[in-house]
Image: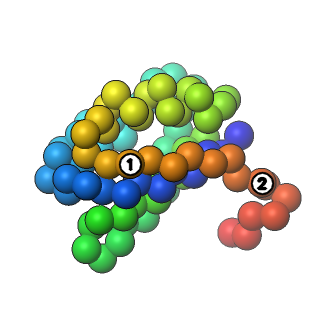
Amino acid sequence: MFIAIEHEITDPELFWQKASGAMSHPPAGMRLHSTMVSEHQKMCQCMWEAESIDIVREFLEPELANSCVNTYYQIDPDKAIG
């Protein structure tokens, strides 16, 4: 399944430091497909592929702790465009 995460970045320096490590070494069974960053680097949206939202959440929350507020949602492949 595809999972999108919206990261509301509260500490950009800490977020990008933590994210660079987390995104480069995801656990087996998880794949990062895209990362879209706002111009001022206060918002970031990522698209992951994994078995469940919980797997992604359990990986990212400790990795990005204290640097952002995350919203997770499953993508509906029948309504997605692109």
- Kindly report the distance in space between the C-alpha atoms of the residues bearing marks 1 and 2: 23 Å
Instruction: Report whether 47 appears left or right of 79.
Output: left
Q: Position of residue 61 (x, y in %)?
A: 39, 33
Residue that appears at 81% across and 64% down: 79
Amino acid type shown at disc 1: Val
Q: Quadrant of the C terminus?
A: bottom right
Are the residues tagged 1 and 2 within 8 Å (C-beta)? no
Foreground residue among 10 and 32? 10
Instruction: Report whether 48 appears left or right of 76.
Output: left
Q: Position of residue 66 (x, y in %)?
A: 25, 39
- The residue identified by callout 1 is 69
Q: Position of residue 16 (x, y in %)?
A: 22, 50
Residue 66 visible in the snapshot: yes
Farthest residue, direction bottom? 39
Farthest residue, direction top? 28
Sequence order check, earlier mark of 1 and 2: 1
Q: Quadrant of the N terminus?
A: top right
Amino acid type shown at disc 2: Asp
Within-10-Å neighbours for mark 1: few <14, some 14–19, many 20+: some
Residue that appears at 73% across and 70% down: 81
Q: Position of residue 56 (x, y in %)?
A: 52, 33
Residue that appears at 48% across and 56% down: 6
- The residue identified by callout 2 is 76
Mark 1 residue element:
strand
The vertical placement of 5 against 31, above or below, is: below
Residue 40 lies in what quarter of the image? Answer: bottom left
Mark 1 vs mark 2: in front: 1
